[in-house]
Image: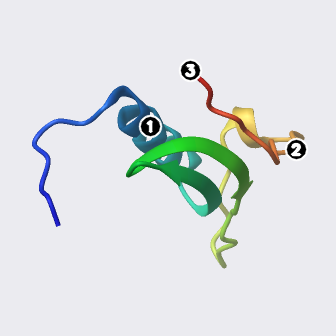
Amino acid sequence: MDVKTTLTSKEKQFLGFIRDLGWGEVKVLVQNGEPVLIYESIKTVRLDDEDVQLPKQHRNRRPKSTVEVVK
């Protein structure tokens, strides 16, 4: 396995996407070792026994079910 020292733009976009997702599932198309498309993402929120307030951006909002990253 080759070890790269720098990330491509597509790799940076993909890492940013999964970091923003936080917790969930992602289906990705990879070509020539790089992410090309994110077909589907499912944001998962783990419920806890403690009373936790969700951030305003997550209240009464359906998560996006499909995201496509095209350059």
**Residue 28 image position (x, y, % from top left):** 60, 54
Secondary structure under the numbered disc 2 in the rendered image: loop
Secondary structure under the numbered disc 1 in the rendered image: helix
**Residue 50 image position (x, y, % from top left):** 63, 72
Are the two marked residues, 2 and 3, in contact with CB atoms closer than 8 angstroms? no
In the current view of this chain or complex, which residue is farthest to the top? Answer: 71
N-terminal of the two: label 2 or label 3? 2
Secondary structure under the numbered disc 3 in the rendered image: loop
Q: Nearer the viewer, residue 44 or 48?
A: 44
- What is the CA distance from the residue labelled 1 to the residue labelled 2? 20 Å
**Residue drawn at point x = 72 percent, y = 34 percent:** 56
Mark 3: which amino acid? Lys
Q: Nearer the viewer, residue 28 or 65?
A: 28
Mark 2: which amino acid? Arg
**Residue drawn at point x = 58 percent, y = 48 percent:** 21
The residue under label 3 is 71
14 up-or-down from 25: above or below: above
The residue under label 1 is 16
The residue under label 2 is 62
Residue density around tag 1, few if under 14, some if 14–19, many if 20 or more, within 10 Å:
few
